[in-house]
Image (cartoon, grey):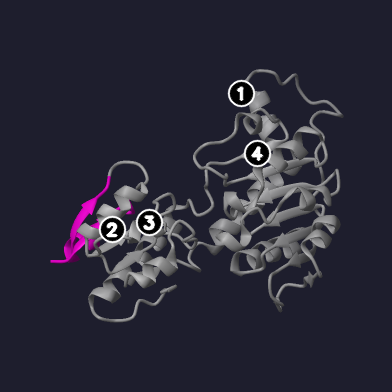
């Protein structure tokens, strides 16, 4: 029986199916270090990893028993897919199934930050709320404003649809290549143009070297002082230091973040800011979505084990 390592506990029905088909080891510690990953690649026929597991190039420099990494997640920037291919290891991911859940989290952050819901919830829990007042916690109206999307892939378009049809928002976007959208939206010439035009900026790009610190101090400086920034992509897409400084100095109104540069570490300066809504990487965190992600990751491994080409292969 082929040996399969699953690096985090996944949905019970998927885990049971895996155990019926493979000799499964469930890793019950934290994310795999690069040394752990190298050991796993030498010890298992297949691995089902996820975000945080370090499969950078160094992991593929030793003995190689593993033939497939069925990644749990659409993003695979924690895996050096080129190094994996050179070592004869297939990499797959889980696109599509988390689009709606992640788009919903973008709207959660956008609305919560605009209406200062995080501050209000803390006020109520701390016993600091003194009752209704005409000027209490005044936020920003969302309806009819301009939304700027950075990265108009599946998730970006799902966010655009929610904002345009649900809140009557005008949508502009930046994308690395020309994009025709079903939702009424205008592709602007540059990232800075989108940052300058938008009342709300939502980042929905993939991670990886091409987008690392894409949102830098210059991009943030182009935003309106009344604008709100939301990131549901990957933490490293944003220069976190530059974002914190912009928030501290009031150069933008607020931020809603689901991802961080060095997860799970969140900088104390960011934690201290009242004008932020901070979530613990909840983008795909629904029961239905996480089960679908686990199933897709396992289905790719099953396809490989049956000498079929995995449907969601990325290398």
- For the record, the magenta segment spans 1-27
Query: Where on the picture, by quarter, is residue 191?
Result: bottom right
Q: Which residue is mark 4?
A: 277
Q: Residue at x 28, y 75 (%)?
A: 304
Please tell me which of labels 1 and 2 falls first in the chain. Answer: 2
User: From the viewer's perspective, is the residue at label 3 or at label 2 nearer?
Assistant: 3
User: Would you say residue 55 sits in the magenta stretch?
Assistant: no
Q: Which residue is mark 3?
A: 58
* Above or below for 123 versus 106: above
Q: Does dot 4 land on a helix, a strand or a loop?
A: strand
Is 61 placed left or right of 286 in the picture?
left
User: From the viewer's perspective, is the residue at label 4 or at label 2 nearer?
Assistant: 4
Q: Which residue is mark 2?
A: 13
Q: CA distance from mark 4 to mark 2?
A: 33 Å
Q: Position of residue 82 (x, y in %)?
A: 44, 69
Query: Where on the picture, by quarter, is residue 71?
Result: bottom left
Q: Residue furthest bottom?
A: 308
* Above or below for 130 versus 104: above
Q: Which residue is mark 1?
A: 125
Please tell me which of labels 4 and 3 falls first in the chain. Answer: 3
Q: CA distance from mark 4 to mark 3?
A: 36 Å
Q: Does dot 3 land on a helix, a strand or a loop?
A: helix
Q: Position of residue 190 (x, y in %)?
A: 79, 66
User: Would you say residue 26 sits in the magenta stretch?
Assistant: yes
Q: Position of residue 43 (x, y in %)?
A: 20, 58
């Amino acid at each position: 029986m082929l040996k399969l390592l699953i690096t985090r506990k996944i949905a019970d029905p998927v885990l049971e199916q895996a155990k019926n088909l493979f000799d499964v080891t469930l890793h019950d510690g934290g994310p795999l270090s690069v040394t752990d990953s190298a050991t796993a690649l030498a010890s298992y026929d297949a691995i089902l990893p996820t975000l945080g597991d370090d499969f950078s190039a160094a992991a593929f420099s030793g003995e190689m028993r593993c033939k497939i990494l069925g990644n749990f997640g659409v993003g695979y920037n924690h895996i050096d897919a080129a190094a994996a291919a050179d070592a004869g290891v297939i990499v797959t991911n889980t696109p599509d199934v988390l689009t709606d859940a992640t788009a919903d989290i973008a709207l959660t952050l956008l609305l919560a930050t605009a209406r200062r819901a995080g501050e209000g919830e803390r006020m109520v829990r701390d016993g600091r709320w003194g009752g209704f007042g005409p000027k209490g916690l005044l936020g920003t109206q969302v309806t009819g404003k301009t939304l700027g999307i950075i990265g108009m892939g599946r998730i970006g378009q799902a966010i655009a649809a929610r904002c345009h049809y649900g809140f009557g928002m005008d949508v502009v976007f930046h994308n690395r290549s020309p994009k025709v959208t079903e939702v009424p939206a205008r592709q602007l010439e540059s990232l800075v143009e989108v940052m300058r035009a938008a009342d709300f900026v939502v980042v929905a790009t993939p991670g990886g070297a091409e987008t690392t610190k894409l949102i830098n101090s210059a991009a943030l400086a182009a935003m309106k002082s009344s604008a709100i920034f939301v990131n549901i992509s990957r933490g490293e897409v944003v220069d976190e230091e530059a974002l914190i400084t912009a928030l501290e100095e009031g150069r933008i109104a607020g931020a809603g973040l689901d991802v961080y540069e060095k997860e799970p570490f969140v900088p104390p300066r960011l934690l201290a800011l009242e004008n932020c809504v901070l979530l613990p990487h909840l983008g795909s965190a629904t029961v239905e979505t996480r089960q679908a992600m686990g199933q897709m990751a396992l289905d790719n491994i099953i396809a490989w084990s049956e000498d079929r080409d995995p449907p969601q292969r990325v290398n």
